[in-house]
Image (cartoon, grey):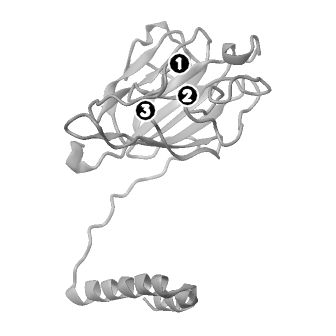
């Protein structure tokens, strides 16, 4: 509390509005202490080490099998990773989530534009984050790696050379719909590629299509995750997800 008061004093010069906020916060803290209210402690989660998932994560793919997916019969598993050979979809449905996955385009950089290392992560089966070999490979601006496909290009091109392992760390907020099917709140996505922010809380304007403008169509608050396949042998490993849906929405 003492540190908080000193911090509040330093902020007084920033204006009456900030001072009022700090004052209310201090009063709240004092009232909590006087009343003996004890707020519930957040759950304990053990962080992963050396690339392993955190303790509360759902492991979707560890390189050993495709048990968490449907449609993965065309995949080839070897050396702790999988080579995409078909579109596959998770058996479990998700909404708000934290998703981690690692991918690598083919080591031989054949083709150009959309014809190099093309795949895609479809959150809820509707909202695509593009996977592409965009290392020294020009294509349309909202179709390169880490773009929200046909909606928003990445802030920067953070791609590694062909064949090298790359990572996506995705924070996704599912859209909510009113009873009449209109949008109550849009989907939003934040993405780090190889530790670099490439999408910063971008609010999607609808589902992603290659041939149509984006638009929303009401769907359940949870839908499966899909990895697409565009005839490129993109490799994947270490895919896990943390469910961030509020309890009142059916967690």
Residue for badge 2: 149
Q: Secondary structure at mark 1?
A: loop
Give the mark nearest the N terminus, 3 or 2: 2
Q: Quadrant of the N terminus?
A: bottom left
Is 240 on the left-hand or right-hand side of 147? left
Q: Position of residue 243 (x, y in %)?
A: 35, 42
Q: CA distance from mark 3 to mark 2?
A: 11 Å
Q: Position of residue 138 (x, y in %)?
A: 76, 23
**Which is nearer the eye, 84 or 28?**
28
**Which is nearer the eye, 20 or 34?**
20
Neighbor class of circle 2 (other Cα within 10 Å; few <14, some 14-19, many 20+) is many
Q: Marks 3 and 2: which is nearer the front?
A: 3
Is 40 on the left-hand or right-hand side of 78? left
Give the mark nearest the N terminus, 2 or 1: 2
* Residue at the image position 23 percent from the left and 49 percent from the top: 247
Q: Secondary structure at mark 2?
A: loop
Q: Quadrant of the C terminus?
A: top left
Is 146 on the left-hand or right-hand side of 74? right
Q: Is residue 80 visible?
A: no
Q: CA distance from mark 2 to mark 1?
A: 8 Å
Q: Secondary structure at mark 3?
A: loop
Q: Position of residue 153 (x, y in %)?
A: 63, 35
Residue for badge 3: 206
Neighbor class of circle 1 (other Cα within 10 Å; few <14, some 14-19, many 20+) is few
Q: CB atoms at circles 2 and 1 under 8 Å apart? A: yes
Quadrant in which residue 232 is drawn: top right
How many discs mark residues in the rendered view?
A: 3
Quadrant in which residue 205 is drawn: top left
């Amino acid at each position: 509390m003492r540190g908080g008061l000193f911090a509040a004093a330093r902020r007084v010069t920033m204006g009456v509005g900030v001072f009022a906020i700090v004052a209310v916060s201090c009063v709240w803290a004092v009232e909590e202490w006087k009343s003996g209210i004890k707020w519930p402690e957040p759950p304990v989660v053990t962080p992963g080490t050396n690339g392993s998932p955190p303790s509360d994560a759902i492991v979707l793919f560890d390189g050993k099998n495709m048990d968490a997916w449907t449609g993965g019969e065309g995949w080839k598993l070897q050396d702790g990773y999988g080579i995409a050979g078909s579109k596959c979809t998770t058996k479990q449905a998700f909404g708000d989530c934290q998703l981690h996955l690692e991918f690598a385009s083919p080591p031989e950089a054949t083709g150009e534009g959309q014809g190099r290392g093309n795949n895609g992560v479809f959150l809820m089966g509707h909202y695509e984050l593009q996977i592409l070999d965009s290392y020294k490979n020009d294509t349309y601006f909202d179709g390169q790696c880490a773009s929200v496909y046909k909606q928003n290009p990445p802030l920067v091109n953070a791609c590694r050379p062909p064949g090298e392992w790359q990572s996506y760390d995705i924070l996704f907020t599912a859209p909510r719909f009113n009873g009449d099917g209109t949008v109550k709140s849009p989907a939003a996505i934040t993405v780090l590629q190889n530790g670099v922010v490439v999408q910063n809380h971008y609010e999607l304007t609808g589902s992603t299509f290659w041939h149509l403008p984006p638009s929303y169509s009401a769907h359940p608050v949870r839908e499966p995750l899909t990895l697409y396949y565009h005839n490129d042998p993109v490799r994947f490993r270490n895919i896990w997800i943390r469910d961030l849906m509020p309890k009142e929405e059916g967690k």
